[in-house]
Amino acid sequence: MIKARRNIGFHLFFKSGFWGIFLLCSLIFGIRWTKGAGYLDFYSLLVKPILPGKSQKEWIQEGHNIEKNIRLKLLEEDNVRLRRALSLKEFNTDKRVSAAVVSRSSKSWWQQLEINKGAKDGISKGQAVIGPGGLIGLIDSTTLFTARVRLLTDPGHQVGAWIGRTKRHGILTGMGTNRPKLIFLNKNSLANVGDAVTTSPASTLLPPNLIVGIVQFVDEKALPAPYAIVQLTASPEAIDWVQVFKNND
């Protein structure tokens, strides 16, 4: 009798153990199959009364404020850029042609850009091109409806420049960045950081007295001639609209 009861007890134990193992395996399989979605839902219900707390709300609000400030800054920058573009268009005269930049290549970012005005609009090779801030380059070639601008930053591109304070001429040479080199024609440049660089007031190839940039660095001991590094006042990397001087028609 006792033996029979033991057998029944073992039988019930193994039977209940089987179903327990089966249920546990089913639960694990379900969590794995649903990738824990049910577990996460259950967990979220448990922690919902305590989240978000005060600190979490502050973090969320801070992130929202940062995003808002960034958006406002970007909108302000776009507004300034568009105002400059509009003022540049409105500043047109009989000797200037306004044009939009329509193409730039990442491989030649500092070398050239394409504009949507060409020979039909009186554009020809050698004409000066300015953007908001000053001179950015010269017309290099044209088609009937477009033109290619060779930028001042193009390595090896050279134009004459002038520092009015010292009455010194130099050759502005592109170096592939937004800071070309100004090589002086005199043994003593007398230039200082902050001096304005322009086209020569006596220039015949370029319009006179066009602003080019500001002296950022001077090396008086360089050989064979002193030089300066010039920060352009017009940023070639951020130009949308330009004007072309038809001074050599």
Image (cartoon, rainbow, N blue to C red):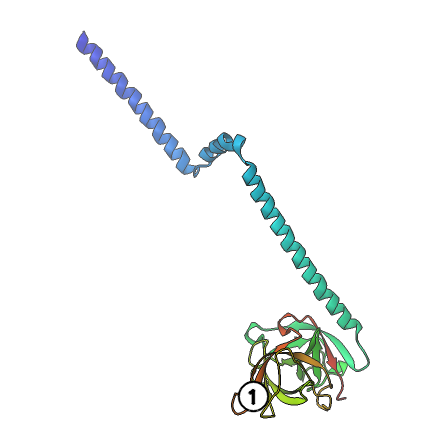
Q: Nearer the viewer, residue 191 or 182?
A: 191
Quarter assignment of residue 117: bottom right
Residue for point 37% across, 33% down: 28
Q: Nearer the viewer, residue 35 or 51?
A: 51
**In the rendered image, the vertical position of residue 87 relative to residue 15, given as above or below:** below
Question: Is 194 placed left or right of 37 in the picture?
Answer: right
Residue for point 27% across, 19% down: 13
Q: Classify mark 1: helix, strand or loop.
A: loop
**In the rendered image, the vertical position of residue 111 relative to residue 59, given as above or below:** below
Residue positioned most to the right:
94
Provide the residue designation for mark 1.
Answer: 226
Q: Quadrant of the N terminus?
A: top left
Quarter assignment of residue 98: bottom right
Question: Is 37 placed left or right of 137 in the picture?
Answer: left
Q: Quadrant of the C terminus?
A: bottom right
Q: Position of residue 176 (x, y in %)?
A: 55, 78
Local packing at callout 1 (Cα closer than 10 Å; few below 14, some 14-19, many 20+) is many
**In the rendered image, the vertical position of residue 119 relative to residue 235, given as above or below:** below
**In the rendered image, the vertical position of residue 57 relative to residue 10, given as above or below:** below
Three-letter amino acid code of the residue under disc 1? Pro
Q: Position of residue 197 (x, y in %)?
A: 66, 82
Q: Position of residue 151 (x, y in %)?
A: 63, 80
Q: Position of residue 55 (x, y in %)?
A: 54, 39
Q: Nearer the viewer, residue 16 or 126?
A: 126
Residue for point 35% across, 29% down: 24
Q: How many marks?
A: 1
